[in-house]
Amino acid sequence: SLRPSFKLLAPLATAEVMELFIGRIPPSVSVNKISEIFAPYGASNVRMLDGKGCAFANFENHFDAQRAISELNGYQMGAGPGLNVKPAANKSIPMQSPPAAAPMERAPPPQPPAIRRFNDGGTAGGMAGGLPAASPTPQP
């Protein structure tokens, strides 16, 4: 009986994984140093892009990722601007609406059909004029 509930819980756990982008890393800082800074926040699988001054880290849940963003964005690692910590673009399950630029790429929403008025050739009385009269006796 535990197996079905495990199947239900497994997708929920993986849906929570969130990836953060870590930018403005000074060239002298190693991936190990970034891992040390982000590990207390639950970061795993920290990867640094060679020569780009940025890295990516996974977080098991959005709460830990948001805490890392709020506490480490702007973190000073020597001279210059602090770290730029934010959700990685298109790398996590959306937790909010898409960016504002997205509607420009989508087709416009379908328009409702035009309202068509039926009439039987000018009989006054709105819709009732276009309907056949009710017959009290069945027709053969």
Image (cartoon, helix red, strand yellow):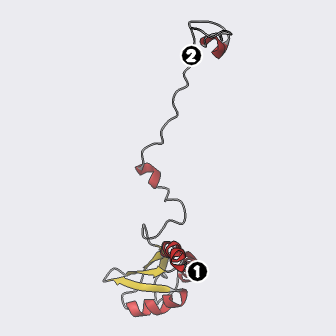
Image coordinates for residue 136, horizontal then vertical, percent? 68, 10
Q: Amino acid at mark 1?
A: Arg
Image coordinates for residue 76, horizontal then vertical, percent? 51, 87
Outermost residue, top side: 122
Marker disc for residue 46? none
Q: Of circles 1 and 2, which is in front? A: 2
Q: Amino acid at mark 2?
A: Phe
Drawn side of residue 136 relative to residue 92, left or right: right
Question: Camera-side residue: 46 or 81?
Answer: 46
Picture layout, residue 102 above or below residue 138: below
Outermost residue, left side: 50
Marker disc for residue 67? 1
Question: Camera-side residue: 47 or 12?
Answer: 12
For the C terminus, the image quarter is top right
Q: Residue at x 37, y 81 (%)?
A: 53
Q: CA distance from mark 1 to mark 2?
A: 61 Å
Q: Residue at x 61, y 13 (%)?
A: 131
Neighbour class for label 1 at 10 Å: few (<14), some, many (≥20)?
few
Picture layout, residue 101 above or below residue 107: below
Outermost residue, front side: 140
Q: Which residue is mark 2?
A: 118
Mark 2 residue element: loop
Image coordinates for residue 18, horizontal then vertical, percent? 48, 75
**Residue 113 visible in the current orientation:** yes
